[in-house]
Image (cartoon, rainbow, N blue to C red):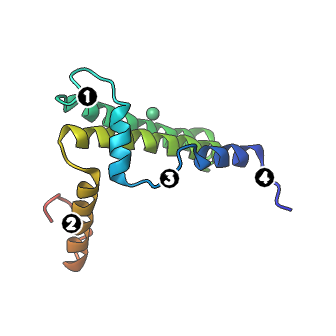
Amino acid sequence: MIRFSDDIKRLWRFLRGKIKGPMTLNIYQAKAWKTAIYPCKGHNLIYPVLGLNGEAGEIAEACKKMMRDDNNHLTITRKADIIREIGDVLWYVAALCQELDIPMEKVARKNLEKLADRQRRNKIHGDGDDR
Ligand SMILES: [Mg+2]
């Protein structure tokens, strides 16, 4: 019988989640938008941009602490922290898409098209957005 440590049990409970049913990026975007409370919601591009940068910074901070405190080893607890912060990033991406009146799935599709095009032209490596 496999015995899980308390950390793994906590991570499993966290990942299992409570929200059931199908999940697409657009469903997420709509549900996330219902939880959005900030000044001039719907006409405020800056708020989600600042939040997105803050949450991306929290991911970087977790990785820094992994290096400093855990000898560069990804612990279960740290992994759960990073996953939680990715969710926060996703929330701000959803809010930003909402402010721009664009479905997240359209953004995702355009991004994959861009990457596939770069791959076809062997331009995945290198710099610049317009490769
Ligand atoms: Mg956060």
Q: Position of residue 96 (x, y in %)?
A: 25, 39
Element class at badge 4:
loop
In the picture, measured across the screen, residue 77 lies left or right of residue 56, that is: right
- Marking on residue 47: 1
* Disc 1 + disc 2, Cβ < 8 Å: no
Does the residue tagged 3 have its C-beta within 8 Å of any atom of ligand 1?
A: no
**Mark 3 residue type:** Gly
Taking the image in four quarters, ligand 1 sits in the one at top left
- Marking on residue 4: 4
**Mark 1 residue type:** Tyr
Q: Nearer the viewer, mark 3 or mark 2?
A: 3
- Residue assigned mark 2: 114
Element class at badge 1:
helix
Does the residue tagged 2 have its C-beta within 8 Å of any atom of ligand 1?
A: no
**Mark 2 residue type:** Lys
Report the Cα–Cα distance between label 3 and label 1.
30 Å
Report the Cα–Cα distance between label 3 and label 2.
30 Å
